[in-house]
Image (cartoon, rainbow, N blue to C red):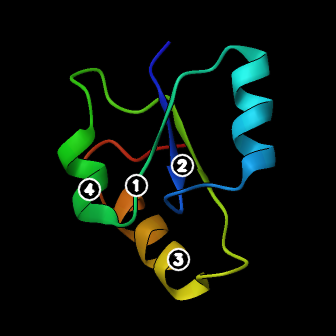
Amino acid sequence: MAPILLFPDPPPPELIQSLDMAGYAWKAVANAVAAEEFEIDGGWGGAILVADQEPDSAFSLARALKKRSEPIQ
């Protein structure tokens, strides 16, 4: 399974713990440029964006992910 994209970097510890316990691979990024830079060939398996601390940045990343040729669901 492809890794899950997380925002922000670092993500909340509770989220990391939950994903690790469930066996999911993940990569945290700070912005859309980093998301594109770290994306693997098969693409991201999904995205979890936590918007409580940085809502403008989270929604900006969400818009960038949606505008891609293959949007992340």
- On residue 29, which mark appears? 1
Q: Amino acid at mark 3?
A: Phe
Q: CA distance from mark 4 to mark 1?
A: 6 Å
Q: Nearer the viewer, mark 3 or mark 4?
A: 4
Callout 1 environment at 10 Å: few (<14), some (14 to 19), or many (20+)? Answer: many
Q: Which residue is mark 4?
A: 34
- Classed neighbour count for the residue bearing mark 2: other residues with Cα under 10 Å, few (<14), some (14–19), many (≥20): many
> Which amino acid, by three-letter code, is at mark 4?
Ala
At which x and y percent is residue 57? 47, 80
Instruction: For the residues labelled 2 and 1, say whether their Cβ atoms are less than 8 Å apart.
Output: yes
Residue shown at 48% from the left, 66% from the top? 62
Separation (CA) of disc 3 from disc 4: 15 Å
Q: Amino acid at mark 2?
A: Leu
* Residue furthest bottom in the image: 56
Residue shown at the point (50%, 12%) measured from the top left: 1
The secondary element bearing badge 3 is classed as: helix
Residue under label 2? 6
